Image (cartoon, rainbow, N blue to C red):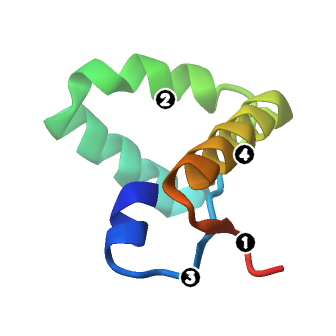
Amino acid sequence: MVRAAKEFDACYVFVGALTLYGKGKELYYRILENHFTELLPKYRQLFKTFNQPSREYQWSLERRAKMLCDKAGIKYGIV
């Protein structure tokens, strides 16, 4: 995604963890069940205790996103 943003001349990117609530969570899991069954266990583990991944996962995602932005030469965030 970062590389694609760079290719389309984006000035910056935001990266954030998925949040799943209520009906949206039900629909999301239904799509996984019907089309991406191999991913279902990973998502169940990721969202087992809350409607979003753990803080550690989110921090890891942010670190990776910043590294990819640096590598692609695109700004991470607006400021």
Query: How dense is the environment of label 3, judged by Cα within 10 Å: few (below 14), some, or many (20 and up)?
Result: few
Asked if disc 2 and disc 4 are in contact, CB closer than 8 Å, the reply is no
Amino acid type at image mark 2: Tyr
Q: List the residue tagged with mark 1.
A: 77
Residue 12 point in image, percent of width and height: 60, 75
Cα–Cα gap, marks 4 and 3: 18 Å
Q: Is residue 58 left or right of residue 43?
A: right
Query: How dense is the environment of label 4, judged by Cα within 10 Å: few (below 14), some, or many (20 and up)?
Result: some
Of marks 4 and 1, which one's residue comes earlier in the chain?
Answer: 4
Q: Is residue 1 in view?
A: no
Of marks 2 and 4, which one's residue comes earlier in the chain?
Answer: 2
Between residue 59 and residue 21, name the one nearer to us. Answer: 59
The numbered disc on residue 62 is: 4
Q: Is residue 24 left or right of residue 19?
A: left
Q: Secondary structure at mark 3?
A: loop
Of marks 1 and 2, the one in the foreground: 1
Cα–Cα gap, marks 1 and 2: 26 Å
33 relative to 39, above or below: below
The numbered disc on residue 43 is: 2
16 relative to 38, above or below: below
Residue 58 point in image, percent of width and height: 74, 40
